[in-house]
Image: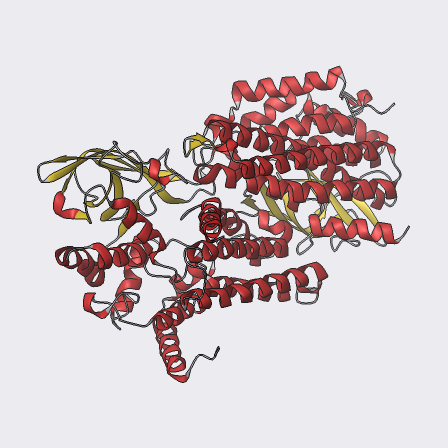
Amino acid sequence: MIDFTHSEEQQMIAESLDRLAYEKYPLVDRFRSADGQRSIAPSLWQDLTELGLAALLVPEEFGGLGGNMEDVMVVMERVGAHLLASPLLHSGVLATVAIASTANGKQKSTWLPAVAEGQSRAAIAITEPNDYALPNVFKTRFADGKITGKKSLVHFAEGADFLIVAAQFGSEQVLCRVETDAQGLQSHVYPTHDGGHAADLVLDDVPAEVLGDGADAGDVVRLLWDIGAVAVCAEALGCMDSIYVQTRDYLTVREQFGAPLISNQTLQHRLVDMHMDCELSRAMTCEAVWAIDNSDATERHRSVCSAKVLIGQGGNRVGKEGIQLHGGIGMTRDLPIGHYFKRLTAINLQFGDCDNRLVGFQRSVENL
Amino acid sequence: MDLSVGPELDDFRAEVRQFLRDNLPDDIRRKCEQERMYLSAQDQRRWHNILATRGWQCPHWPAEVGGTGWSEFQRYIFEEELAYADAPRTHASAHFMLGPTLLEYGTEEQKRQFLKPVVDQGTFWCQGFSEPNAGSDLAALKCAAVREGDEYVINGSKLWTSEAQYAEWMFGIFRTDNSGKRQYGITFLILDMKSPGVTVEPVILFNGEHEVNAVFFDNVRVPVSQRVGDEHQGWGIAKFLLGAERLGIAEVARTRCTLERTTDLARSFPSPENPAIRRPEIAARIAQIDIELRSLARMEQRVLSGHAQRGTEESMLKIKGSELLQLVLELHQQIVGPYAQIDEGEVDPETGPGVGPWACGHAGRAFFDYRKLSIYGGSNETMRNIMAKVLSMEA
């Protein structure tokens, strides 16, 4: 039977994240300082690992919770609602999936328990300079236990203990573990508009350990790309719903011309459109979440592209309308609206932007 | 109909262009090129002094108050050339708001006292209109000015005051009477920002920029001689001020430059071998914006020659101009793609990063910053209300 309800356990995870955010990282206070979003980083990661979230996708036999994509959806949505910028997606989801799906038994049993406990944090380096999206062939090369090449926009690379790097190995693609203090690794860190940070990496003959036996991991790389896309779609739902609710509430209390703004029919219609964007985005994200765990690669790709396009466009509209309908106050730092918009904008640009995913969908339909 | 420009204006254009080529400092040009709308007080004053060497520091004012005395189309060309050169506009609140208002409603003494220092020293002004509860509904303003002998005593606050952090003077509208219609009992006053009781507090925007402020008044005393027009009759003056300057509202030339820069970027980014402009969706979007910009440019010319529906002109230019520039910046972001996530504001351009394509520059910042275009100066919703009112009265 079709059922969109999340399980009780999932709702409990969501509630525990809500509690953490309300008690320790309330949005109303966070942005009153110049660097509000970045200032929460040090303690937030620790708090998230204490909730067990770094272990979410780690198989139970390696000390994890053995979760699935729906669990990720539930968590990421709350992450979006509270704007909790953290390495959770990169270490707890993507690097974990990379290891769990390609590493050999020894690697898993050595690495995964430390990742699950949050003792060891990973960043994931896939995209390369000048790429809009996932390239078919990586310029970064692996040979003889060493990696050479460049990676860009590696989110939360700073502070990570190790990297999972995607590289070309002859005609095949491999995923490798690289220590962040390895010889020959240079990193240039920069802040991103959404309050996080990323790095450009230059790897020059850097020692690397291939995950698994070196068989082609191209399918896993594409899976990671899609999982990342769906995870940020779920995060976007949290941002969009929050913008919608805050905008509706503001129009209800804000009076101009002797009446609440919401009494203007033209503004009501715009709120209605925002709400429909939220609903359609949620529906599409549910399909993409389901597809990650249940569909074949082609159908999965189609669902993920659909979600990414829809959420990219819907998030953009909802963010812009949220600011516009607030008026000047929506432009200010102390209100969360602008910060949701910045995050939604970043989400739109990650794991394939609207244009890229639209073309991706088009191609997969043409190949029918 | 004749849409040719005429040789005398061609010469004028060449003269302006040459001056800008020779005199615009490169650091100021770069800031404009990167869509920085507000320059520091220092930069604005430098620019004022440079224009003053040619007597062009008040390009839009008549000659008798120290301006150039140019015709509307000369001024239009001057603004275009500023845009094409990536040169800043002149200080808006003094030049486009205070000036026309005093010329229409000010006494001879007021014109001498307030316009001459703008010409001679580039005095900075700010506009005290909006308040916390008077935004789109400006007539709801409450900031009170109470008459005591030869002075008004002001108590209350103003919000969204651009450049108040360094403005030397403010013009604004204040509540002097509550008994009648809300549009009655509003008085237009000029005040010294150094007056005792004036406090300026920054309002930081979500992109981290400080442009606007809250201004608080605690028993601020203003001489009656600094009232413009009659007591209680300031609403009409405020409306005149908001509609006085059609020129440049639509920022057609600036948007055209931004589009050209963006198109150039699309020809080389992310790499010359595989430029974004080869993506059909990018090429189509550039074409679409270009077409809309052409129509806006001609509409602006029609407005300036008095051919648009009276009462709708500023609103149309404001709505379409702001929407189009926002579209160009969104296109810029699309071209830069994931690299628009990078917050260049905090990276040292000399040392900063290694391998990412650094052409992305200001894509994110400008995209976020320019959301304000459709909000300030009368939100686009307010502009549409005005147009609806005018057009339905015509019906």
Q: Please name whichever residue, A306 or A90, is drawn nearer the observer in this view of the structure.
A: A306
* Whole-percent x, y for residue A41 in the image: 55, 30
* Whole-percent x, y for residue B338 in the image: 64, 49
Horizontal arrangement in the rendering, residue B208 relative to residue A284 (left or right) = left
Q: Residue at x 85, y 30 (%)?
A: A105
Q: Please name whichever residue, B369 or A97, is drawn nearer the observer in this view of the structure.
A: B369
* Whole-percent x, y for residue B22 in the image: 36, 75
Q: Quadrant of residue A286?
A: top right
Horizontal arrangement in the rendering, residue B253 relative to residue B49 (left or right) = right
Q: Please name whichever residue, B210 or B346, is drawn nearer the observer in this view of the structure.
A: B210
Does residue A98 show up? yes
Q: Residue at x 12, y 56 (%)?
A: B109
The quadrant of the rendering that contains the N terminus of chain A is top right
Q: Quadrant of residue A131?
A: bottom right
- Can you name the residue that lies furthest to the left here? B149
Horizontal arrangement in the rendering, residue A303 relative to residue B9 (left or right) = right
Q: Residue at x 24, y 46 (%)?
A: B170
- Can you name the residue that lies furthest to the right here? A368
